[in-house]
């Protein structure tokens, strides 16, 4: 991992523009554990153990390449309709706080992995373009281009822009968003445009797609197959399903499992705005919803989320995977202060972990 220091506030914007893609500042925090077994909050398995037609042997030796990744859920780094005058709103705070404010309580984790991936569910634009028309109750989220720095200053390396809000302001708004994100050094993925990124000699392909019905799994499968020849690990980050329910739709479970069967090494999802449990299916971890993370959508979202960490060990084409779940609050004020934080209370942590492993109906 390339390291550089975060300088004083007056210099940080210049650093963001000039830094290379994927560089992570040294936040001088504790290193994320690089151990791949014996985690109290996860399990270790061999991905090829149950995958049909593949070797069941995973040889681990000093030649193995290792990679740590963190995944967080929906980040709405904006306020509805792009307003900035509402005191305490995310846009209002973003005009008054340094960009590092929003992720600062989880920065030690996100800056000390190899790759951090988030879902970004808003438009970055300085244009006065009009929102698109929507049916029924609807929301439009936009913010200034400068606020894309929040992602880079939070340790995010990759964002998926495939969701139901990045096109709130049409094609120009979407194009503005891609440019705003990428100028900070963060890679942007969306439908039919997977992100391919290399760390530690491991080539990772991340398919970013919508999953609004069972049939759409075939599009994800096609993209996974298209990147296999040029990647070692294939990951799908989808957006879809019913909002505000803690149990994934049956069709979504079936669709995600089909994606795993097609060879994805990890499947994670967002959109419900609440957590949904994970499972291990044929040796592949599937997280059905990561919930919200930095969430500008309202002042009192459900206040539980996670950082999902995946640790990959690659040796001669075989993959060994372990994971770690870090329970977090979405916010730490009396109402949303736009700052996720790690849950330290043992009882509250255990509730989230029990829920994520399907042993509890709610995470609180």
Image: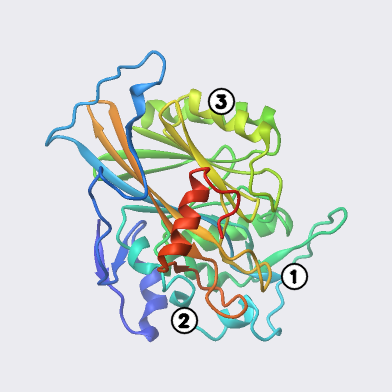
Instruction: Report the front residue among 95 and 18.
Output: 95
Mark 1 lies on a secondary structure that is loop
Cα–Cα gap, marks 3 and 1: 37 Å
- Name the N-terminal-most of marks 1 and 2: 1
Q: Is residue 35 above or below residue 130?
A: above
Cα–Cα gap, marks 1 and 2: 22 Å
- The location of residue 356, given as percent across then percent down, is 50, 48
Q: Is residue 186 visible?
A: no
Instruction: Report the front residue among 109 and 182.
Output: 109
Q: Is residue 230 left or right of residue 92?
A: left
- Name the N-terminal-most of marks 2 and 3: 2
Q: Residue drawn at (68%, 49%), measured in percent from left and top?
A: 245
- Circle 2: is it few (<14), some (14-19), or many (20+) Cα within 10 Å? some
The residue to which callout 2 is attached is 98
- The location of residue 350, given as percent across then percent down, is 44, 57
Q: Residue drawn at (49%, 73%), measured in percent from left and top?
A: 102
- The location of residue 78, given as percent across then percent down, is 63, 69
In the rendered image, the quadrant that contains the C terminus is bottom right
The residue to which callout 3 is attached is 258
Q: Are marks 2 and 3 in contact (CB under 8 Å)?
A: no
Q: Residue drawn at (68%, 57%), measured in percent from left and top?
A: 172
Q: What scheme was used to colour the molecule?
A: rainbow
Q: Is residue 138 above or below residue 240?
A: below
- Disc number lying in front (2 or 3): 3
- Disc number lying in front (3 or 1): 3
Q: Residue furthest top?
A: 53
Q: Quadrant of residue 136?
A: bottom right
Cα–Cα gap, marks 2 and 3: 43 Å
- What label sits on residue 81 in the rendered view? 1
Mark 3 lies on a secondary structure that is helix
- Name the N-terminal-most of marks 3 and 1: 1
């Amino acid at each position: 991992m390339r390291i550089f220091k975060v300088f004083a506030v007056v210099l940080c914007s210049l650093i963001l523009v000039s830094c290379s893609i994927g560089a992570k500042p040294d936040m001088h925090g504790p290193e994320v554990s690089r151990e791949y077994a014996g985690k109290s909050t996860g399990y270790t398995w061999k991905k090829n153990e149950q995958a049909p037609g593949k070797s069941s042997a995973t040889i681990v030796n000093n030649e193995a390449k290792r990679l740590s990744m963190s995944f967080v859920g929906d980040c709405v780094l904006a306020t509805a309709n792009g307003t900035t005058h509402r005191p305490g709103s995310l846009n209002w705070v973003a005009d008054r706080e340094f960009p590092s404010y929003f992720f600062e309580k989880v920065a030690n984790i996100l800056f000390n992995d190899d790759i951090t991936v988030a879902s970004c569910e808003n438009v970055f634009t300085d244009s006065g373009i009009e929102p698109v028309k929507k049916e029924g109750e609807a929301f439009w989220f936009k913010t200034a281009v400068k606020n894309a720095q929040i992602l880079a200053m939070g340790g995010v390396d990759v964002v998926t822009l495939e969701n139901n809000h990045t096109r709130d302001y049409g094609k120009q708004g979407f194009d503005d968003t891609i440019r705003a994100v990428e100028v900070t050094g963060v890679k942007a993925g969306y439908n039919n445009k997977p992100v391919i990124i290399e760390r530690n000699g491991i080539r990772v392909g991340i398919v970013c797609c919508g999953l609004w019905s069972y049939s759409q799994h075939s599009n994800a499968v096609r993209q996974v197959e298209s990147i296999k020849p040029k990647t070692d690990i294939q990951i799908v980050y989808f957006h879809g399903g019913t909002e505000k329910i803690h149990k994934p739709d049956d069709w979504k479970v079936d669709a995600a499992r089909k994606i795993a069967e097609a060879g994805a090494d990890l499947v994670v999802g967002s959109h419900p705005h609440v957590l949904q449990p994970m499972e291990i299916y044929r040796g592949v971890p599937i997280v059905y919803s990561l919930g919200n993370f930095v969430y500008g959508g309202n002042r009192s979202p459900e206040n539980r989320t996670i950082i999902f960490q995946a640790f990959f060990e690659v040796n001669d084409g075989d993959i060994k995977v372990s994971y770690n779940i870090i329970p977090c609050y979405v916010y730490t004020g009396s109402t949303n202060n736009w700052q996720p934080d790690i849950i330290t209370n043992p009882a509250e942590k255990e509730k989230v972990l029990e829920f994520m492993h399907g042993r509890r109906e709610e995470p609180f």
